[in-house]
Image (tube, coloured by chain):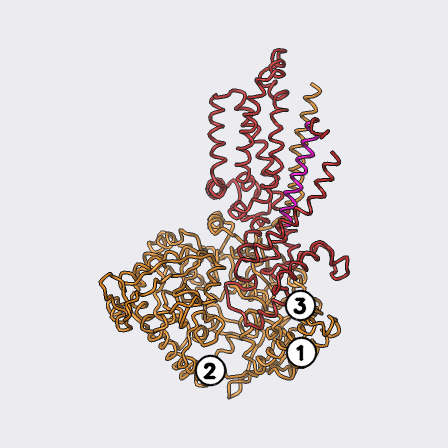
Amino acid sequence: MTALILRRLAVAPVLVLTIMTIAFALTWLVPGSPLDDEGRAPPPEVAAAMQRQYRLDDPLVFYGQYLSRATGIAWLAGQADRPFDLGPSLRHPDWTVNEIIASGLPISAALGLLAIEMALVLGLTVGVLGALRPRGAIDLLGQAVTVIGISVPSFVTGAALLVLLAAKLHWFPVGGWGSWRDAVLPAFALSLPFAAYIARLVRFGLIEQMASDHVRTAMAKGLSRRQAATRHGLRNAFLPVLSYLGPATAAAMTGSFVVEKVFAVPGLGRHFVNAVLAKDITMILGIVLVYSSILVAMNLVVDVLYAAVDPRIRST
Amino acid sequence: MVAGVADRWRWTIVVAIPVALAVVLGWRGGLSDRPDVVIAAADPFTLDPQKMSWQQELRLGRALFETLVRPDPDSAMPVPGAAESWDVSPDGRTWTFHLRPDARWSDGSQVTSGDFRDAWMRLMLPDMAADYSAFALEVDGAQAFFEWRSKALSEYAAAIESGERSPSGEAATALWEKTREQFDERVGLSCPDDLTLVVRLRRPIQYWLDLAGFATMSPVHRPSLAAALSINPTTGAVEVDPRWTKPGRLVSNGPFMLTAWEYQRRVRLEPNPQYWDRDRVLPRSVETRSYEDNNTAVLAFESGAIDWIADVTVDYRADMAAEVRAGHRTNLHVLPAFGTDYFQFNCRERLPDGRANPFVDPRVRRAFAMAVDKRILVENITRMHERVADSLTPEGSIPGYEPPPGLASDPAAAKALLAEAGWVDRDGDGVVQDAAGDPFPTVDILFSTSSTRYGAMALALRDMWRDALGVQVEVLGKDTKFFRDDLKRGQFLVARGGWFGDYGDPATFLELLRTGDGNNDRKYSSPRFDALLEAAAVEIDPIRRLDILRQAEALVVQDDLPLLPICRFVNVFMYDPSELEGISVHPRNEQDLARIAPRRPGSADASRGLGGAAP
């Protein structure tokens, strides 16, 4: 297993660099400059000075310098005063990309983790309840709700939750990010598709397990259907959920843009989409770096966890 | 049973770890108390006063800094600010400002004339890349200094690029010192003493106080700027450490100081205890919060979390405006703005792809303009009932200036005018052709899809032009970046546009059509129009000057029509006038955050801030 981890760790930087290079090339091809905005056109002298300052005149020079600063090579060579410098945001000159990531990533990460947490609790409950009495009333209701959860986009559920629970019933604040109460609705809206998917995974896995020899033996020894399910069936039925959790956590942490927008949460997802719209190259690259690292890391974590849960994988 | 206990432990861990992580990551100090005034507004791009350009920044700039004079919110006329008085020479070119002896920075130090001189110098540096450099460039010698510095910088960079010289801090510093000498030598700004600033302009400017009172003309606290300044040895350009505008480092001289700024979240202001006129500052704290989704802002307003939405953009705002007109709603305020919404015609001889451009003929542009019924656009398409516009300059917003009447809608006359320009339906297929029998090229109406407003307008224009003129018209929506790219390259026949004025003079609109102006996307070029603008620029008599400008405007809105004015923009605010007072309803939208506060019981001025319904 150590070999597996080492191999994956060695490939990770190459993977991240490839993703970033593709992102850079695509961004560069979009017309317009991050330096011109909707407002007044700057005099040509100003535009030229800005191009020089940010090295926007030559993509190779720009990307080369960017990488050497971002990776810390420039710092090691003594050309920069700090490592991992992702540069200034081209659209928000008062902020460095490092500052923006430092402010947005914890928020998106907290939101994503909470959402996955809620998805697990919801998904397991609905899935297990359904599997205990397949085609019973609870199961049919659960199935219907999960189909809705998977198919309705989060800007709809988000807006509906906002109008109903926040604006009409005043149970929660309307948007913003400050106290734990602000996090409940966005995390819930974000968790729904994940919860639905987990519920379905658990239900089908558990129904299959309930028919297996070891669960039937347990019930023959006197355990109730529920006891047999939670103590013996769930252990195996949970495996597919575990492999789903890795990409799901990454997706919840990086894909919360819509929910962040609807609930006015100042997370990284929102900053990313705005950076793309403004062609803010340094911001795009910085966030792509973070996102691709999270994805690669999450996949690695799942592989390790999988090995820990299933001894058969350890030997390979 | 042992397995069961272990399972339970495992579940506890699975549940507890992410929750703990989320708590640690997400909440390192939240929003504490409810500020006196909460405003929903976009996050500023910058709080560096010289770099500001957007409405939300300029509004904060005005709260944080105080210019020599500042606009009165109700009339937009300049009133004393950091300067208590001023004199102007008979030729209208030399202005002497006398600063208040009690004007203080938030760190307690004296506001001096040098703080203004150095701030304005920043506007004249090409490497500062200030959007609003144009106002400072009206100072005598500033343009020459700007050009000298541009040349010096590009020579410096070229020498390093070619390997002639290696990047060195010394050479860059020497260039900077030389630049300061050049500034003192060339630019008409002097400080005879700490409280006197003498400004020599390159021409007499009647609206100079408007320019001097613009937020970007704020002074700069020299010690904190100096601490953040560095000179790039490779480009020779001055660079500022962006952290200097953050709370704790930003020193301001206005009614407020900055106590928090969190990216895309909130900006918090609290009264500046050193401000000379601190008694006029009403709120104890003001916060602007960024709501990306305007619908959320409206819901938050209705829940009481927000006091004022400075720009209501939700799709259903037209329905809310209808409720206001019917008397069922009092918290939405649709106010005429100092800006004009228009569509523009390409005036280039040919398009970049080589096609001939029929709109090069002013008669064709006039015909297209006269074929439009603007009332339908504002009543049925935007449904905001904006004031229909036939001129570029908004009426009633500049004292002493009444814009020319412009062209009235007249589809029949439009058709005749198009025929006069040679476009007649010769074969009876419903489409006009020129003398050689070639049909009028298909007119694509170019607009940006960033808002639904222009797509709907373009569709309506398409139908009006098809029906009235017998031309093929299509709509062409593009993403903002692509739209702007087409606009700059001149790859369009008709495109949407719009402009907000910056100061109380028609020039703020008319400059847009001057030959060579950076914002003249139409490439309209009329020697007569340029000559009128030149004549107005040197005219000392204010009445004669406005008359010349009126002639210039008449030329473009009645004869040449490089653009087709549709309506005045509106500022759409949401606030409850019985709860909040002090918001200005003047078209210039010069808001003074120092006087916007919760209305206290028995407030002396009950009428203030009672904004009107739709125009």
**Residue B314 x/y as whole percent:** 43, 52
C-alpha distance separating marks 3 and 1: 15 Å
Residues rendered magenta in the picture: A289-310
Q: Quadrant of residue B224?
A: bottom right
Residue identified by numbered label 1: B179
Residue B90 lies left or right of residue A94; in this view the side is left
Mark drawn on residue B239: 3
Report the residue at 67% width, 30% height from top. B12
The disc numbered 2 marks a residue on which chain? Answer: B
Tell me if mark 3 has few (under 14), some (14-19) or many (20+) residues whose alpha carbon lies within 10 angstroms of its own: some
- Above or below: residue B347 compared with residue B298: below
Palette colour of chain A: red
Residue B541 lies left or right of residue B213; in this view the side is left
The disc numbered 3 marks a residue on which chain? Answer: B
Q: Indicate the chain coloured orange by its letter.
A: B
Quadrant that contains the C terminus of chain B: bottom left
Q: Is residue B361 magenta?
A: no
First in sequence: mark 3 or mark 1? 1
Q: Element type at marker 3? A: strand
Front label number (2 vs 3): 3
Query: Which amino acid type is shown beneath numbered disc 2?
Result: Ala
The disc numbered 1 marks a residue on which chain? Answer: B
Q: Quadrant of residue B19?
A: top right
Report the residue at 69% width, 47% height from top. A13
Query: Which is the main secondary structure of the residues drawn in magenta?
Result: helix
C-alpha distance separating marks 2 and 1: 29 Å
Tell me if mark 2 has few (under 14), some (14-19) or many (20+) residues whose alpha carbon lies within 10 angstroms of its own: some
**Residue A101 x/y as whole percent:** 64, 51
* Residue reaching furthest to the left: B428
